[in-house]
Amino acid sequence: MKYFFYKLAVFLSFIYVLQTLITYIFPLALPEEIKRFEGYLTMRPSPDIIYFGDSVIRDHNEKDMDKRGISDMLKDYYPEYTIASMDHMAYHANVYEEYVNYLTRNGYKPKFIVIPINLRSFSPEWDKRPIYQFEKEKLFLKYEGTGVYPLLNFLISFKVFNLESISENEFMNTPVYSGSKKIGIVKDFENSSYEKYNDQKMINKINYLYMYNLSKNHRKLVALKHIKDRLKRSGIDLVLYITPIDIETGDKFLKGDFRKQTTKNIQVIKDVLGDDVVDLSYEIAASDFNWKMYPNEHLKEKGRKRVAEKVAERIKNLLLSN
Amino acid sequence: MLFNSFPFLVFFVIVSTLFFSIPHKFRWLLLLLASCYFYMAFIPVYILILFFLIVIDFFAAQFIEKSKGKKRKLFLLISILSTVGILFVFKYFNFFADNLTALAHFLDWNYPITYLNILLPLGLSFHTFQSLSYVVEVYRKKYKAEKNFGIYALYVMFFPQLVAGPIERPQQMLPQFYKKMHFDSARVTDGLKIMVLGFFKKIVIADRLAVTVNTIYASPQEYVGIPLILATIAFAFQIYCDFSGYTDIAIGSAKVLGFNLVQNFNYPYISQSVREFWRRWHISLSTWFRDYVYIPLGGNKVSTIKHYRNLMISFLLSGVWHGASWNFVIWGVLNGVYIIVQEMVSPIFTKISSLNIPLYKYLYKTGSILVTFMLICIGWIFFRAKDLNEALYILTHMHIGVVQWLKDVLRLRFFLIQDYTFKQGENGLGVTGDVLLITIFMVGVLLVYELLERKEVIKKLPSAAKWVLYIFFVLAIINLSVVHEVPFIYFQF
C-alpha cells in the first residue's frame, strides 16, 4: 500500500511540474480586460493614473461635440501624466478590489488610482445579477502568479471555483426594499415590461435601483474599504468619488423620500470610507444626464467634464498635501 | 453530485479511505450511507421515491419466494405495476397528456388536461430496471430473495452506477457485497486508470464536441450540407464518449473499491451490422430488453413474422425508455427496422461470401462498418433533434453542397471549405478551426487507444510508456476542460 501512495504522489508531482511548464510555454487564455490591464502595467513609462470604472466613464450622447470618456477628459488637466482606463460595463467594487490586489501584489506603483462609487451598484439589480459578477476575471486576477494558476481552468471546470456564484433563481428571489420596507422581489421588477413608459413604472424602477438600505457590511463597501487600506499600505494615492445620480428626477417621482434615502446611503459610505470620498452625487443637473427611458448615471459631455474637473481637483489636493 | 466535479473527487477519496479502514461487517452500511448522500446531492426529497421502490421490491421478492402458484404472479405484478407506475408518473405522464390533448382536439372533445410540474428523479429509468430485473430473477427462481434489507437497498443505490448504470443483475452484483475486499494496489491502479480514461472521454472529447453539436442543433435551419453532417458525426462521438466515459468512471470507481460492474460498451462503432451494434452499445440495457422482453415474447424461436414483431416491440420500448417524445419512439422503431431489413438481406450476403471473390471479405468488412455507422448516425439525428420537424430538416438538407465539398477537398481548396463550413449560421460551428482540429485529434487518440486496447497492446506496454500515456490523458483533461457545465447526456433518462 505504501508503494502505491508513493507512486501516486510521484505521478501527481510529475503532472504538476509538467502542467506548470505547459502554462509557462502556452499561457492560459486570459479574459480580454486582464490582457488590457497587463498591457497597461507593462507600458513604458508605466501609467501614472489608473482609472477604474463602469459604463458611466465612456457613455456619451450622439449630440456631444466632445465624445471622450471621463478618463480621457482628465488628461486635459494632467497632460504630463499617462492615464490607463480600466472601465467595463457593470464593473464594480468587488472587481476593482481584485485589480488593485493584483497590481499591488506584483509591485506596480501608479501615482493615483481613481475609483467611482456607483450608488446603483449596491442595489440588488446590479449587486446580485449573475452576469455582473465577473467571476472569471476575479479568479484570474486573484490566482495569476500563484501555485494554483496552472490548474485554474481545470479547477473551474471541476467546480472548485464556481463561475456562477449567484444563480438566476437566487437573483430573481432577492428581496427589494424601499428603505426598510420590503416592496417585492427582483422577479417582480425584472419581469415587468419597461418598454411602455408610465409614471408608476418609473417609480418602481427608481425604488428598485436606488431605494435600498445600505449596510456598513455590504460586500461592495467592504471591498472599497479593503482597497483603501491596501493602497494606503502600498503608498498609492486613491481618489474615491460617488458617481452623480439624477436627484432631480428622483425628487420628482419619489418626492422627499428619494433624497432622504440616498443621503442616508451616502452617509453610510462616508462613515465607512471616510470624509475624503468626493461626493458628486447631487452635482449634476438632470439635463446633463444621458439616460433614455429610466434614470441611470450616464452623462452627457457637460456632465462628464464636470466629473473630470472634480477628479482633477482632488488629485491636485493630494499632490499639494504630499 | 457530478462525477466531473471536485466534490465527487473528495467524496470518493473519503469513502474509499473509510471503506478500507473500517471492519468488513460495516462496509455495506458505509457504502449505503455514502450512496444516500450521493443521491441526495441532487434533489434530497427524491430519495423517498427510491426508498419506496426499494421497500416494494424487497418485500415483493420475499413474498414471491415464500408463495406458490398464482400468488407468486400476483406479487410480481404488484412489483412491476408499482415500479412502472412510478416511472410512468414521473417520466411519461406529461407526454401521455400531450398526446391525449392532441387527440381530443382532433376529435373536438372538451378534455381538461392536467400536467404534472415535477422533475424526473435522477437515474429513475436505470434503477427501476435494476430492481425489476431482481424481482423477475427471484420469480424465475434464478436468484434467491435477498434477506438483508440494507444489502438490497445498496444493490439498488450503489453510487457508482446509481444514476446512469450499468444496469446490474442481482447474480452479478449482490454476492459482491458479502465479499471481503482488500486494498490491492494493482486493482486500485487499474480502477484509477479506467476513471482517468472516463474523464478524458467526457471532459476532453464529449464536452468539446457538445459545443459544436449544441450550436448547430440549436437552430439547424441556419445550416445546410457539411455543418449538418459534421454535427451529426460529432454527436455520434459525443454521445459515445459521454456515456462510455460516465460508465468508465462508474466501473473504475467500483473497481477501486473491489467491485466489478458489467461492461457496458464494447467498441460499438466497429460494428458490421446494427444487430452487432446493439450487442456492443449500452450492453446492460440491450441485454435487459433481450432477457425480459424479447425472449419472453418468443425471441427468434417463433415464426418469422412474430420474430420481427418481437424485435420491433423490443426496440420500440427501448426508444420509449430513452425519452418521452416521438423522436425517441421513431429512433427506437428505426433501429428495429434496420435489424429486420438486415435479417432479410443477410442470406444474400452469405451467398456472395461463399463465392470467394478476391478482396470481398475485406471490402465487405469495411463497407459494413461504414454503412452501419451511417445508419446509426441517421438514428442519432432523431435522438438529438428537438422535434420531428428539425430531424427531418437535417435529414433532407445534409446532402446539399456535398459534391462541391468533395471536389474542393480533392483540389485542396481548404480556404473555400473553411468559408462555407465555418461561416454558416449566426454562430458558425460554435468553435474556431484550431479548437475543432484539436478535438478531432483527441478523437483520433481515443480511437488508436481503443484499437490498441482491443488488441491487448496497452496491457503489455512497459511501465514507462503507460506512465507517459496516462500523464498525457491527465494533462489533456487539465488543459482542455470546457469551462462551463455540460451535463451527462444519459442523466436525462
Image (cartoon, coloured by chain):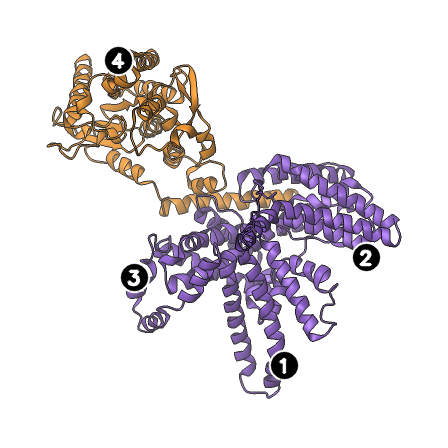
Chain colours: A orange, B purple
Say left or right for B2 vs A230: right
Q: Which residue is mark 3?
A: B419
Residue A220, percent from left and from top: 37, 22
Q: Nearer the viewer, mark 1 or mark 4?
A: 1
Q: Do tag 3 and tag 1 residues touch (Cβ < 8 Å)? A: no
Residue B319, percent from left and from top: 59, 58
Q: Nearer the viewer, mark 2 or mark 3?
A: 2
Residue A106, percent from left and from top: 32, 30
**Alpha-carbon span between mark 2 and mark 3:** 62 Å
Same-subunit check for callouts 2 and 1:
yes
Q: Which residue is mark 4?
A: A276
Q: Nearer the viewer, residue A96 or A185?
A: A185
Say left or right for A49 vs B327: left
Q: Which chain hosts label 1?
A: B
**Alpha-carbon span between mark 2 and mark 1:** 36 Å
Q: Which chain hosts label 3?
A: B
Q: Nearer the viewer, residue B156 or A193?
A: A193
Q: Which label was assigned to residue B140? A: 2
Q: Nearer the viewer, mark 3 or mark 1?
A: 1
Q: Nearer the viewer, residue A51 or B484?
A: B484
Q: Earlier in the sequence, mark 2 or mark 3?
A: 2
**In this orientation, does residue B143 appear?**
no
Residue B74, percent from left and from top: 81, 50
Q: Earlier in the sequence, mark 3 or mark 1?
A: 1
Q: Nearer the viewer, mark 3 or mark 4?
A: 3
Occupied quadrant, residue B103:
bottom right
Q: Which label was assigned to residue B347? A: 1
Q: What's the residue type where badge 3 is placed?
A: Asp
